[in-house]
Image (cartoon, rainbow, N blue to C red):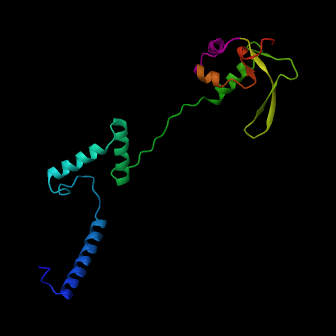
């Protein structure tokens, strides 16, 4: 039929088709996207199955990576809302921290080095430097932790947190030179 049209009529037909195409694209753009699958998105079940098979072949082999890729695609398409991971962090109360620091600095737990050069300089959060006299633990960390738990039964603290709270000026005996 188009072959038989005159050049002017063919040009008018193309202009009309372009107008219809623009109208159609505007109408599709304004349609709300629903989460329900459209039964007419593919011409047949076979076409849908073929597309699914292609996508499945393109996915990584690892299940966790597959899930991550699919989740990312669904977020980009707006099918799912973006997931915001909130991490629940249990932090120690400040009272527990001060108790641990006082415990490390006790004379029956750590020995204060007498020398003038036995000092440690520590920067505070403000950026100011503070000098502390070096202290040496009389027991190993496991024994010190057990003593702390025996004296403070109401305080709950893990051994690793207890070790992390050890002040910089309190040194372990094994890390000190043998002459001390």
Q: Indicate yes or no whether the magenta region holds residue 170.
A: no
Outermost residue on the front side: it is 3
Q: Quadrant of the C terminus?
A: top right
Residue shown at 66%/27% (left/top)?
A: 97
Q: Nearer the viewer, residue 127 or 63?
A: 63
Q: Quadrant of residue 144?
A: top right
Answer left or right for 49 relative to 22: left
Residue shown at 22%/84% (left/top)?
A: 12
Q: Quadrant of residue 102?
A: top right
Answer left or right for 40 relative to 149: left
Answer left or right for 12 relative to 118: left
Residue 177 x %, y %: 77, 15
**Residue 55 drawn above or below residue 149:** below
Residue 89 x %, y %: 53, 33
Residue shown at 29%/61% (left/top)?
A: 32
**Residue 51 drawn above or below residue 121:** below
Count of all numbered marks drawn on residues in the image: 0
Q: Quadrant of the N terminus?
A: bottom left
Q: Quadrant of residue 166?
A: top right
Residue 42 x %, y %: 19, 56
Q: Which region of the structure is painted magenta?
A: 139-158
Residue shown at 21%/88% (left/top)?
A: 8
Q: Nearer the viewer, residue 173 or 137?
A: 173
Q: Nearer the viewer, residue 16 or 112?
A: 16
């Amino acid at each position: 039929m188009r072959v038989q049209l005159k050049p002017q009529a063919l040009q008018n037909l193309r202009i009309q088709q372009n107008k219809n195409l623009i109208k159609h694209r505007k109408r599709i753009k304004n349609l709300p996207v629903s989460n329900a699958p459209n039964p007419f998105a593919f011409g047949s079940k076979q076409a849908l199955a073929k597309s699914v098979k292609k996508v499945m072949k393109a996915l990584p082999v690892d299940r966790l990576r597959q899930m991550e890729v699919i989740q990312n695609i669904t977020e980009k398409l707006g099918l799912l809302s973006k997931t915001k991971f909130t991490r629940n962090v249990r932090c120690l109360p400040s009272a527990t921290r001060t108790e641990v620091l006082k415990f490390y600095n006790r004379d029956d737990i750590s020995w204060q080095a007498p020398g003038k050069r036995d000092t440690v300089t520590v920067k505070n959060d403000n950026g100011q430097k503070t000098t502390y006299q070096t202290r040496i633990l009389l027991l190993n960390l496991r024994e010190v932790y057990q003593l702390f738990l025996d004296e403070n039964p109401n305080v709950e603290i893990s051994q690793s947190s207890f070790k992390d709270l050890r002040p910089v000026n309190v040194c372990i005996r094994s890390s000190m030179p043998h002459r001390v």
